Image (cartoon, grey):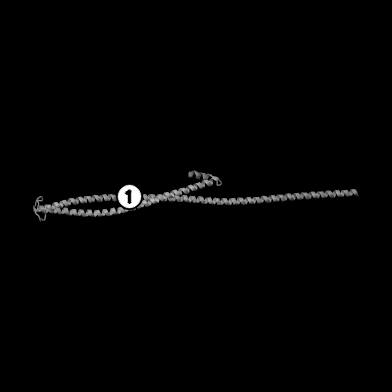
């Protein structure tokens, strides 16, 4: 519709009465478009604020997960070291029993330095510790997976913000172009109105001057007619006087 109106404006002459209506309609619709685009831009800006807020929260979660992962890694390392020590201790006690010739399956007397009971207890502790290490490793892996997912979400938020910022910039540029066009057209209309005012003033002055010239010509014409009539009357008067003088002379000669 706007393109058709633009073609219409280009096809209309400067003096066409429809031209002003078409231009005014286009300017009005352009300003309405700017208002709608400004609303969209405001919505996008609010969306950027919302997404940035969510991203900030996720960054806090990421920091917590990183700290928790480091803590769990330290705990797992300590538990693994403890597990190694217990396994080494059990191995050492078994070797002692074997070297002393004791049957590891036979119950030992109370107060013995190395006993099968102590080895069995170590074996039980090693089993429990291995379960705890496996559980901690599983929790650490889950936490690491959540950390990676959170990082991806943060990257997605950053990409969304970048895209929306690009859209906002395009809208600002487009609105700026429309506003520049509107200003140019309005200034042109003001110039046209000023030129029209000058032309109308010149036309009025020319008309008044023409009327004055016409009046002077009429007056001069009347003067010419008056002078001509005066000359004709004077000529007639001279002719009458000459005829009178002739007739008087003839009459005088007859009376003599």
Q: Can you identify the residue that label 1 sits on?
A: 153
Identify which residue, 95 or 186, lies in the foreground. 186
Picture residue at 25% right of the left edge, 55% below the top: 71
**Residue 24 appears left or right of 144:** right
Question: Which residue lies at the image location 80% right of the left edge and 50% below the top edge?
Answer: 237
Q: Percent from the top left, x then y, of residue 66?
A: 28, 53
177 sits left or right of 152 in the view: right
Query: Is 151 situated left or right of 94 in this image?
Result: right
Q: Is residue 60 visible?
A: yes
Count the marks: 1
Neighbour tally class for label 1: few under 14, some 14-19, many 20 plus, Cα within 10 Å:
some
In x, y percent, where is residue 54? Answer: 34, 51
Q: Splitting the image into 4 quarters, where does residue 60 fall? A: bottom left
Q: Residue at x 51, y 50 (%)?
A: 186
Can residue 94 be seen by looking at this rendering? no
Q: Secondary structure at mark 1?
A: helix
Residue 243 position, x and y percent, is: 83, 48
Question: Looking at this view, is 13 or 128 the one in front?
Answer: 128
Q: Residue furthest right?
A: 256
Residue 100 in the image: state x and y as whole percent: 9, 54
């Amino acid at each position: 519709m706007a393109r058709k109106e633009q073609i219409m404006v280009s096809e209309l002459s400067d003096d066409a009465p429809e031209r002003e209506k078409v231009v005014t309609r286009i300017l009005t619709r352009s300003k309405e478009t700017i208002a709608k685009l400004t609303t969209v831009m405001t919505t996008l800006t609010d969306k950027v604020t919302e997404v940035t807020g969510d991203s900030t929260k996720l960054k806090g979660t990421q920091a917590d997960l990183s700290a928790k992962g480091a803590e769990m890694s330290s705990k797992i390392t300590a538990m693994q070291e403890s597990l190694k020590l217990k396994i080494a201790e059990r191995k050492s006690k078994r070797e002692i029993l074997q070297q002393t010739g004791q049957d590891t399956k036979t119950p030992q007397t109370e107060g013995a330095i190395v006993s099968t009971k102590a080895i069995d207890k170590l074996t039980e502790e090693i089993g429990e510790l291995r379960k705890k290490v496996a559980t901690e490793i599983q929790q650490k892996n889950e936490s690491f997976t959540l950390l990676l997912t959170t990082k991806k979400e943060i990257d997605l938020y950053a990409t969304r913000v970048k895209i929306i910022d690009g859209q906002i910039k395009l809208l600002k540029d487009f609105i700026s172009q429309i506003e520049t066009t509107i200003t140019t057209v309005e200034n042109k209309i003001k110039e046209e109105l000023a030129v029209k005012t000058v032309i109308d003033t010149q036309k009025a002055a020319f008309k008044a001057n023409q009327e004055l010239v016409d009046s002077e010509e009429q007056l001069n014409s009347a003067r010419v007619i008056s002078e001509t009539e005066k000359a004709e009357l004077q000529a007639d008067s001279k002719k009458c006087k000459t005829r009178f003088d002739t007739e008087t002379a003839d009459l005088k000669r007859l009376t003599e």
